Image: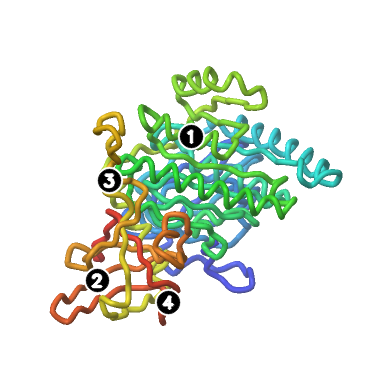
Amino acid sequence: MAYTGAMGAPLQPPTTSLSSIRQVKLDKESELRIEVGTETSLKLRLLNGTAEIFGTEIPTEIWISFPPGYKFAVFTWNGATIEMDGTTETDYTADETPMISYVNVHAVLEGRRNCAKASSAKDPDSSQGPRVIVVGQSDSGKSTLSKMILSWAAKRGWKPTFVDLDIGQGAITIPGCISASPIEMPIDPVEGIPLDMALIFYFGHATPSLNTELYKVLVKELAQTIERQFAGNAESRAAGMVINTMGWIEGPGYELLLNAINTFNADVILVIGHDKTCSRLKDVLKTKPNVDVVKLQKSGGVVSRNHKVRQKARNCRIREYFYGLSNELSPYSNVANFSDFFVYKIGGGPAAPRSALPIGAEPTADPKRAVLVNINRDLLHSVLAVSFAKEPDQIISSNVAGFIYITDIDMQRKKITYLAPSQGELPSKYLIAGTLTWLET
């Protein structure tokens, strides 16, 4: 966590006016819902009792720093006293939460993991832990529930795999990505999930509607990669996975949801606060007796966001990738020749159906084809992925090493200036462009 101390030693209160420090006493099974002010950070610590944030326990007497605009809730099962230093946009205590139902789901998943582990001792190939997929509209609390389930499992010694299919926000890495990572420890509520073991495929857009076929292909590539990892690791297989989905659950979004359920062989579908989707899924999955569809209540602490707020959150995630949560990272500015790279875009728009073409004719646009693009000023402020592909025809099936940000393009000198997290040559000459841009401020 973002603790402000060394060797776990408790700190003295920050050197700000004492009037900004206040205590809140929480009763059993209640939570303190907080929105940090937009201009300053907030420090918080647990004075007594026990409490958690997104399923991760808060250590006693250690200050934790939360950045401006951060939204979270401190929940206690048995009562606690919290101390805060700083300003909040809002904070209030709630005693009506869905946490009991959430932890009951965790208990069921724990039992399934134990059964899978017991089976693996007899037949490593036949055991499989729960494959949970979390469903709901935008701003229903899907990523928060996913983090809780993962952190509770990690606290019990499991190492479940987190799969993030929500390209709009990015719970593991920047937006525009389909990604996965093993969770070996309860998730840090501030710093999130480490990137050192993340498996990332770059879609390149903030909405799947721009290329639904590519989205499905990348979901399949990610699922197949995880299956190969599970085949050689009985521990990970028994721990299972938790899959976070996007909020687009109508029309084509619903079809993409069904595709994800089938591709990952999900056997537990958790639907947060949406009766229609829950009913539809129960109906379409009733032929699969081993699949459970469970409706859960949406937390009253969930905050709805408009398009502008979502765009700002995406920009913050991109900035965090290069500069860190608190500007603790120093990215490198590099200059290269146009000839040093090959920039590709995937697809040229939706392909026309064969039924609409003359007999024998083939579609002229393939949404799954990697197309080489000329480097020009159109790429300025773009976020490009660095592919692990060895050849152009491997780009769509290859994961990425990381990302660069284009800060300048000199057409006269044929030079490109870009920001990268580390110094030196990029691990690949193949770059992937989409519609994801960022204007550094």
Q: State which quarter of the image contains the N terminus.
A: bottom right
Left or right position of 156 against 1: right
Name the spot of residue 220 as percent of width and height, x first: 51, 45
Residue holding disc 2: 407
Spot the residue most to the right.
Answer: 122
Name the kind of residue labelled 2 in the image: Thr
Label 2 vs 3, first from the N-terminus? 3
Name the kind of residue labelled 1 in the image: Asn
In terms of depth relative to the viewer, which is nearer, 90 or 379?
A: 379
Residue holding disc 1: 259
In front: mark 4 or mark 1? Answer: 1
Residue holding disc 4: 422
Name the kind of residue labelled 3 in the image: Ala
Q: Is the Cβ of the residue at disc 4 closer than 8 Å to that at disc 2?
A: no
Q: Residues within 10 Å of mark 1 (few under 14, many from 20)?
A: some
Q: What secondary structure is marked by label 2?
A: strand
> Which circle marks residue 365 in the picture?
3
Label 3 vs 4, first from the N-terminus? 3
C-alpha distance separating marks 4 and 2: 16 Å
C-alpha distance separating marks 1 and 2: 37 Å
Left or right position of 125 against 205: right
Q: State which quarter of the image contains the C terminus.
A: bottom left
Q: What secondary structure is marked by label 3?
A: loop
C-alpha distance separating marks 2 and 3: 31 Å
Name the spot of residue 130 as percent of width and height, x first: 67, 38
Q: What secondary structure is marked by label 1?
A: helix
Name the spot of residue 138 as percent of width and height, x first: 39, 36
- Mark yes or no: residue 46 visible: no
